[in-house]
Amino acid sequence: MKPAPFRYVRARSVDDAVAALARDSEAKVLAGGQSLIAMMNVRAAKPDCLVDINALSGLDYIKVKDGGLAIGALTRHETVKRSALVKEHCPLLAEAYEWIAHRAVRNRGTFGGNLCHADPASENPAVALVTEASFVLKSAKGERTVAAGDFFKGVYQTAARQDELLIEVRIPSRPKGQGWGFVEVSPRKGDFAMTATVVTLELAGSNVKAAKIALTGVSDRAIRLPSVEAALAGKPATEDLFRAAGEAARKAINPSSDFHADDAMRRDLASTLTRRALTAAKSRCA
């Protein structure tokens, strides 16, 4: 099958891109195209217009800004994976990239495009949640910033309006002493997760000072587990506590079944992976 007919606009500037989005309520942004083009080929997506932003080299960057990372929306996955700044300021994101896609996809796909696609089994949205990232969106009317916790709305749905272009993702730097853990089970290396658990952990002595836990592959979007996080606070960071957190994670989710795994398997995975991610995070609290 071939895509439905569409108009093509090659944007020469950010203002050019947002003006094109404002003109056509059925327009979509083309960045890496690793998801959009595949969906168009089976007519799961039928935009009237594609606004190609690949000429906007000003959106391809990774830099330190206001004490954290700023990543341009057009930055390619492989660039993020190899970045020394990412490894220094957000090692959790660097670890997640060991699981994301294959090099051919990473060479073309973009960090911002992946987040805006909002696949419920994608890794980066869960990382954005536990790092409390924020998203800078621009339209012809101006800019606004949306917290990661408010950005992901459902399957392929985000808070970005149709006329808005994601231009930057901001990730606070890892606090001193914070540990991190990322554990995933996927059908094959590079596939989307059946279930993944993403964790950050801070200790006060031998007790948990703060924990953040997000799961992907178990809902219509990546989700935080605030009740499990709260149950960890102030308690000794032991394997027994982490095992209990895993059981709490099992009960906190309501996953669906598909041909990869049924709901019971995903609950089992959430339990085991949460325990493992917390254990890994504790080993890195330094």
Image (tube, rainbow, N blue to C red):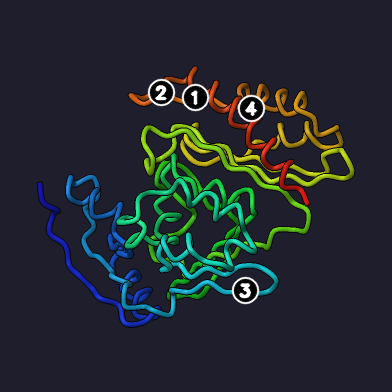
Q: CA distance from mark 2 to mark 4?
A: 17 Å
Q: CA distance from mark 4 to mark 1?
A: 11 Å
Q: CA distance from mark 1 to mark 3?
A: 37 Å
Residue type of the residue flagged with mark 2 = Ala
Residue at 48% over, 49% down: 98
Residue 74, above or below 205:
below
Quick check: 108 left or right of 71? left
Residue type of the residue flagged with mark 4 = Ala
Q: Residue under label 1, please give it.
A: 266
Q: Residue under label 3, please give it.
A: 64
Q: Residue under label 4, please give it.
A: 249
Residue type of the residue flagged with mark 3 = Val
Along the viewing direction, whichever of 284 and 106 lies nearer the viewer: 284
Identify the mark at residue 261; answer none if there is no mark: 2
Dot 2: element: loop
Are the two marked residues, 1 and 2, in contact with CB atoms closer than 8 angstroms? yes
Choose the circle earlier in sequence order: 1 or 3: 3
Dot 3: element: strand
Give the percent coordinates (x, y) of residue 194: 44, 32
Residue type of the residue flagged with mark 1 = Arg
Residue 202, above or below 108:
above
